[in-house]
Image (cartoon, rainbow, N blue to C red):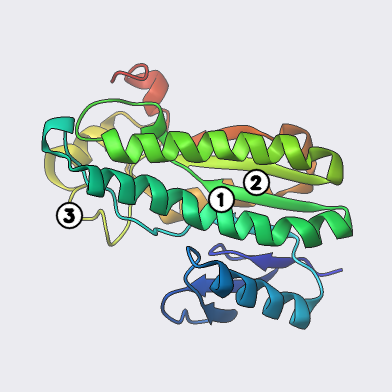
């Protein structure tokens, strides 16, 4: 049986949800913070494929405002935390019923090691990612006996079009030097971890977080680094 995937990760049959169209696989536009849009998205995928085996929740619904508390408005802080959780909440609620009905499923949330570190303006981002990790553990507890397993993949700094300017110069050199890879993480490194998390063999690891930081946490130090 081919596995049906609602995700921004490639593998099996891929259904991509984004605000804009994505090339390849099958795609659908949806605002994952909007319950009716989420319902339409999932209903359409189920109508076409009959099941969803794996969901990767990786929507950047609210870019983080990097600022210290003194410089951070409540509106900016609340927008990040609410936006981060809204997509996860609505997608999770909608896919759990069909996953429970089929007796199997995997939900993978893309978190961040920002949940573990402090300083450098991470207040809003770190709080949002910490909340996401806690949310994931509750979902894991509520769905484990139904055959649905939940994992969080938490990358460190990853080079993407959005971060490319930040991860250059000295910052990029430090990250490369303090990595077992000898370089900054790339999107492919995160994709490999997601593929591992999606393996049914990891069902027993439900409720856990897979850190992907190139060894930064052990080479540099603990959560205050």
Residue where numbered disc 2 is placed: 196
Residue receiving disc 1: 192
Vertical position of residue 41 compared to residue 168: above or below: below
Kindly identify the residue that appears in the image at 40 percent across and 26 percent down.
Answer: 116
Question: Which of pointers 3 and 2 lies earlier in the amino acid sequence?
Answer: 3
Q: Nearer the viewer, residue 36 or 44?
A: 36
**Cβ–Cβ below 8 Å for labels 2 and 1?**
yes
**Rendered image quadrant of residue 7:** bottom right
Badge 3 marks a residue whose secondary structure is loop
Residue position marked by numbered label 3 in the rendering: 165
Image: 124 above or below 40? above
Mark 1 or mark 3: which comes first in sequence?
3
Which part of the image, by quadrant, shows the N terminus?
Answer: bottom right
C-beta proximity under 8 Å, tags 3 and 2: no
Dot 2: element: helix
The picture places residue 32, in percent across and down from the top left corner, at 50, 65
Q: Is residue 212 left or right of residue 177?
A: right
Residue at the (17%, 54%) spot, across then down: 165
Seen at 85% across and 45% down, the residue is: 146
């Amino acid at each position: 049986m081919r596995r049906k995937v609602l995700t921004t990760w490639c593998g099996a049959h891929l259904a991509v949800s984004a605000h804009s169209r994505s090339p390849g696989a099958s795609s659908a536009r949806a605002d994952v913070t909007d319950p009716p849009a989420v319902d339409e998205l999932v209903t359409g995928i189920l109508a076409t494929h009959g099941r969803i085996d794996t969901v990767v929740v990786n929507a950047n619904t609210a870019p983080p405002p990097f600022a210290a508390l003194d410089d951070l408005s409540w509106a900016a802080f609340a927008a990040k935390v609410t936006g981060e959780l809204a997509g996860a909440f609505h997608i999770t609620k909608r896919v759990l019923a069909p996953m429970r009905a089929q007796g199997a499923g995997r939900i993978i949330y893309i978190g961040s090691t920002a949940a573990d570190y402090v300083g450098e303006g991470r207040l809003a981002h770190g709080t949002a990612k910490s909340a996401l990790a806690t949310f994931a553990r509750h979902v894991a507890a509520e769905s484990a006996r139904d055959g649905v397993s939940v994992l969080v993949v938490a990358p460190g700094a990853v080079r993407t079009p959005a971060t490319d300017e930040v991860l250059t110069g000295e910052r990029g050199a430090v990250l490369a030097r303090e990595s077992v890879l000898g370089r900054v993480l790339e999107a492919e490194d995160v994709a490999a971890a997601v593929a591992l998390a999606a393996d049914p063999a990891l069902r027993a690891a439900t409720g856990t977080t897979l850190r992907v930081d190139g060894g930064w946490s052990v080479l540099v130090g603990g959560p205050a680094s």
